[in-house]
Amino acid sequence: RNRSRRRNMRIAEINRKTNETDISLKLNLDGKGISKIDSGCGFLDHMLTLFASHSRFDLCVKCVGDMNVDAHHTTEDIGICLGKAFAEALGDKKGIKRYGSMILPMDEALILSAVDLSGRSCLGFSLDIPTAKVGDFDTELVKEFWLAFVREAKCSLHIKKIDGKNTHHIIEGAFKATARALSEAAMIDERFADEVPSTKGVL
């Protein structure tokens, strides 16, 4: 019963307003992959929707940003909010698996994502993206999104392209693989439900 109650509390809500973006975000780590995304950027909406679906996290995002400039602030600031929510929802991290990884094929693209919910922020990003844009979205913002996320989530995340030529497939594969890796890492391991998975005793 205690374990179930703790799981049900793995929810966080973040509201963040700057001169560039106004964001409200809600995350449930023990959801069903339900999402409601309105970032103002169609491609980012697509990525966040499939992120929720593949992680099985429930995710609601509403962002009003300076899209008249470009998608940079919107993308980075949503990454910040998602990272903050993820860290808050994890709480003391008791019982989590801590590590997660996925090698995911997306047509010709093959993407590796591996995560350690270590309490330390590190991004290893080896995602060679062939084109500067996909639709109206600047593809360099993919790195900015995950960099913002890991800084706030305080995790080590490695995303690596093993193969791939199509820009859309590569980026989509990265979001799907990372969603599944994060889902695995955040999962409660019933064998160690009351333990922090570290010899330090804290993460």
Image (cartoon, rainbow, N blue to C red):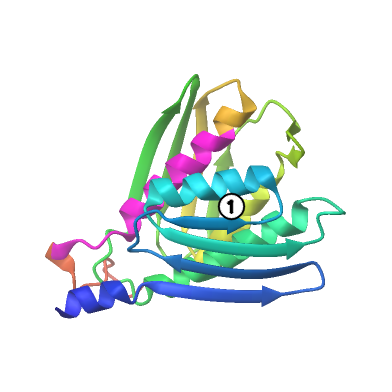
Q: Is residue 90 above or below residue 137?
A: below
Q: Main secondary structure of the magenta part?
A: helix
Q: Mark 1 — residue?
A: 146
- The residue lying at 45 percent from left, 46 percent from top is 178
Kind of residue at badge 1: Trp
Q: Which region of the structure is painted magenta? A: 171-190
Q: Is residue 192 above or below residue 75?
A: below
132 sits to left or right of 191: right
Inspect this view and state whether residue 153 appears: yes
The foreground one among 182 and 162 is: 182
The foreground one among 46 and 100 is: 46
- The residue lying at 53 percent from left, 64 percent from top is 83
Quarter occupied by the N terminus: bottom left
Q: Quadrant of residue 128?
A: top right
Q: Residue furthest right?
A: 69
- The residue lying at 28 percent from left, 67 percent from top is 198
